């Protein structure tokens, strides 16, 4: 079957890399990048681009009518830190954007939908270590609340309408191609830039704050693997736990020092993102993803650090 793929939120940290990879697999003209901002990267030259605000359902409807997509990746969202600055907007975008896409997917018989969830669905009373797929979930950020509600909607649309929707609970994503977009885990990207430019970094999270993380190459590979898996292998229609590694700012700094021996790590005064990080898991049990569709990360802390520094130096 000829695939037509919409990537909504194509200019963000994930979208930038996902569009490139999907275009390699399906052909440039079959992957339509959509965003509210003009693309900065190769995306605009390589294939089609549409200005779309996921909250403007009429315009979104026109895009569905024009392309009749077989797959949609909905990446447009406000993340944890920016969400706390504008909770109502975060709820509106994260929730109504999803419902708009789900409804249009039913109307236009879109075969498969991808929607990202996050470790932010867990909260202060969730188990912190090797957090299981199913446990207490009491998120206390608007981002986490919207992602947990979104997961429930995804499962509901699957059960009620048979919509083939697939999802991953991303940990912090580390990448060098596009800037991160207002998350709590962003320190793990800023630290690399500052290490190379200034030789030092001030972390807004404390030395011992351990969080689950993943290198973008693994995240893109995992996302496409989940979308390519046969439907009968997908036993979880809310969202799959997934992880690559876990570390603290101190452990990451020690790894960076292996490449930049004079690098020093300091800490800022208390930052509200610390409270968000404190409510999240330290590590994730992703055995369901491993068993159902063969998930296996390729990047650990040392391989990721070496690759980040090599690419950012360029
Ligand atoms: C964030 O920090 O908000 C995101 C996430 C973990 O979903 N990176």
Image: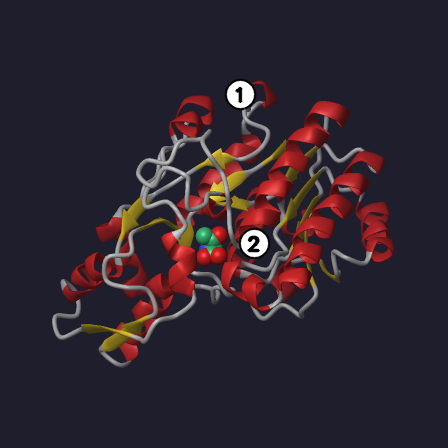
Q: Report if residue 176 is visible in the image.
A: no
- Whether label 2 lies within 8 Å of ligand 1 gets the answer yes
On the rendered image, what quadrant is the N terminus found in? top right
Looking at this view, is 9 or 172 the one in front?
172
Residue at image mark 2: 143
Label 1 belongs to which residue? 233
- Judge by depth and name the residue closer to the eye, 167 or 152: 152
Q: Is residue 63 above or below residue 72?
A: below
Left or right: residue 102 versus residue 150 is: right
Q: Residue at x 31, y 69 (%)?
A: 191
Specify the quadrant of the image occupied by residue 287. top left
266 or 176, which is in the foreground? 266
Residue ranking furthest to the front: 125
Which tag, 2 or 1, sits closer to the chain's start?
Answer: 2
Q: Residue at x 41, y 41 (%)?
A: 125
- Real-space CA distance between mark 2 and mark 1, rounded to the nearest whole angstrom: 29 Å
């Amino acid at each position: 079957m000829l695939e037509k793929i919409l990537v909504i939120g194509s200019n963000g940290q994930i979208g930038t890399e996902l569009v490139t990879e999907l275009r390699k697999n399906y052909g440039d003209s079959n992957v339509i990048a959509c965003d509210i901002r003009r693309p900065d990267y190769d995306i605009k030259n390589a294939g089609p681009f549409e200005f779309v605000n996921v909250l403007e359902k009429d315009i979104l409807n026109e895009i569905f009518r024009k392309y009749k997509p077989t797959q949609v990746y909905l990446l447009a969202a406000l993340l944890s830190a920016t969400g706390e600055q504008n909770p109502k907007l975060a709820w509106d975008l994260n929730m109504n954007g999803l419902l708009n896409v789900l409804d249009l997917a039913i109307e236009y018989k879109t075969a498969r939908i991808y929607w990202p969830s996050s470790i932010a669905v867990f909260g202060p009373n969730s188990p912190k270590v090797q957090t299981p797929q199913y446990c207490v979930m009491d998120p206390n950020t608007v981002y986490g609340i919207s992602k947990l509600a979104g997961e429930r909607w995804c499962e509901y649309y699957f059960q009620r309408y048979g919509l083939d929707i697939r999802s991953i609970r991303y940990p912090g994503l580390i990448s060098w191609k596009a800037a991160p977009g207002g998350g709590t885990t962003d320190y793990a990207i800023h630290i690399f830039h500052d290490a190379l430019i200034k030789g030092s970094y001030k972390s807004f999270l404390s030395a011992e704050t351990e969080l689950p993380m993943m290198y973008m190459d693994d995240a893109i590979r995992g996302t496409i693997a989940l979308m390519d898996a046969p439907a009968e292998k997908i036993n979880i229609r809310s969202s799959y736990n997934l992880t690559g590694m876990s570390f603290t700012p101190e452990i990451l700094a020690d790894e960076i020092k292996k490449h930049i021996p004079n690098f020093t790590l300091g800490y800022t005064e208390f930052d509200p993102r610390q409270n968000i990080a404190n409510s999240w898991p330290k590590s994730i049990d992703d055995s369901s993803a491993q068993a159902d569709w063969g998930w296996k990360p390729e990047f650990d802390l040392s391989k990721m650090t070496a690759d980040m520094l090599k690419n950012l130096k360029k």
